Amino acid sequence: MMSVPNASMDHLPTPVLDVEKIRADFPILHTVVRGKPLIYLDNGATTQKPKQVIEAVRRYYERENANIHRGVHYLSQVATESYESVREKIRAFINAREAREIVFVRGTTEAINLVARSYGASHLTQGDEVVISAMEHHSNIVPWQMICEEKGARLKIIPINDAGELVMESLPALLSPRVKLLAITHISNALGTINPVQEIVALAHERGIPVLVDGAQAIAHTAVDVQALGCDFYAFSGHKVFGPTGIGVLYGRAELLESMPPYQGGGDMIASVTFEKTLYNEIPYKFEAGTPHIAGVVGLGAALDYVQSIGLGNIAVYEKQLLEYATNRLEAFDDVHILGRARSKAALISFNIEGVHPHDVGTILDQYGVAVRTGHHCAQPVMDRYGVPATVRASFALYNTFHEIDVLVEALAKVREVFR
Amino acid sequence: MTLPELKDLYQEVILDHTKRPRNFRRLEDAQLKAQGMNPLCGDKVEVFIKMNGDVIEEVTFQGAGCSISTASASLMTQILKGKTIAEAKELFEKFHDLVTGKAKDAEFHKKLGKLLVFSGVCEYPVRVKCATLPWHTLKAALEGLDKPVSTE
């Protein structure tokens, strides 16, 4: 039998969070998979929901459900108040200047599409350029490709080095006078790299180029301050920060949002409509056509309250412990290769086992109750960069434990046993 | 010790064909070929066929994929040698029923021969596409499709 390197239950670090108390808040973490306790290490795909979020959504439907911004009746006012109070909560959470800079969307993908379709379509012309990086998720590539193709503009790519960090020296040369926008991920979903957003924004702004930040992987793991980052747009999804699916946020600087044409037409986004002319509503409503996912907004509010009750500072410290522990344990296998060695890295490990396809690894880990992501992680250019078709990705959150990492490592030893 | 269920999926024959895939090469004088891919996991396979009249004289494959898709392609190339197009298509149907758990009687199993090692796949619905990708690609080649086939 293959030995499990350095099994070290007695050398576990002391967690800085009361993880058992946190785990008690997440009903799904008590799921039994094939007779074994679920070990959920697919937080990069979506996070689980605490009972506070589930309860908030339930309470909304049981006691507050009505359409917003419409009725004079009691419930409509209650629903509108709940909805708008979350907008203010989000403003505070990411330290935006004003609540009207917070636009509710379906998720990060829709937020990026909104900016591409609205800001991109009204600013890009033939020969212009949009700069992205080699580590983007498809959702921060394809919307730009589509609008560039439509406008005859070009996509320029910031390269990454072997460690999975942006080659920052290449950036000044890429920021030509033709660049109309720079779109960059805060944290790479495939490599875990935390990008130096502040520095990138400073370089872009020196040249008058606005910056969009894809915050999908960052929002649950690091404190986000859009004013400190200096970015012009920041996009994130509720479901990646312990909230419901189908709700997300686009932060945009007020003057930019005001200058942008609407993204979709419909109810709520208008001030007045005649068949001759429609006057658009103020921001953010101009970008919120149709009845929104009100329950999702309420749930997202509860999720952010939950995160704040624990503190993103504490979460970041604990996840760093998890990352270091998991990295050390995986490195003890001589045939496990980790992709992404950034000095500044989030709690996510992409890896491959020599001679074993990630799909097979995923199937075997699942037999041990361990849920990981296997595949290209919607980041095929990253896979191409490293010459692999896919990887296994273990992505951690505040409720994961050192013991769960031990089980992952034991299950990986079984993988090697099967494919010996 | 390995979980017993895993042994059903990763049978010795499958592991052997994963490590040493048979007929794993381009066939320069192939009359028929096709590419297949599974966009969800990035598996890619290319199938080459040399015909002699209506009979499949030789099948080879190339590509990169998981254990299940590699072993499936490898065993497919072995079993199809000397079969007619109609027999190959019938075998694919039988194989498809096997990995989707639709047919379990002994009479049916007899026809599948070595391919029976994939009977465990039906317990793993997400892996059905891995097992059938080479066959879908083969079918595309036989039908002369020049567009890559996709499992999606």
Image: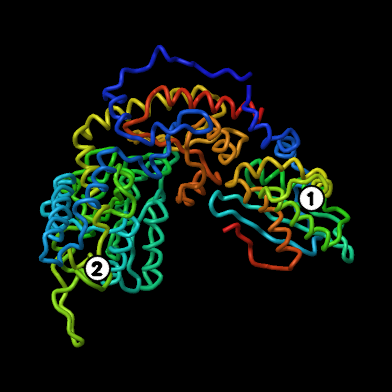
Kind of element beneath mark 2: loop
In what quadrant of the picture does the N terminus of chain A appear? top right
The residue at 63%/49% (across/down) is: B128
Q: Is residue A203 visible?
A: no
Residue furthest to the top: A10
Around disc 1, counting alpha carbons within 10 Å, would you say few (fewer than 14), some (14 to 19), or many (20 or more)? many
The residue at 28%/40% (across/down) is: A220
Pointer 2 residue: A289
Please name the amino acid that badge 2 sits on: Ala
Q: Is residue A295 left or right of residue B78?
A: left
Give the percent coordinates (x, y) of residue A138.
42, 55
Q: Is residue A333 visible?
A: yes
Check residue B77 in the rendering and tell me which mark sits there, or answer none: 1
In what quadrant of the picture does the C terminus of chain A appear? top right
Check residue A293 in the rendering and tell me which mark sits there, or answer none: none
| Closer-to-camera residue (A12/A136) | A12
The correct choice, above or below, for A179 with respect to A370 in the image is: below
Tag 2–tag 1 contact (CB < 8 Å): no
| Closer-to-camera residue (A336/A239) | A239
Mark 2 and mark 1 on one chain: no
Task: Quadrant for residue A73, please give it.
Answer: bottom left
Give the percent coordinates (x, y) of residue A16.
26, 23
Kind of element beneath mark 1: helix
The residue at 21%/68% (across/down) is: A260
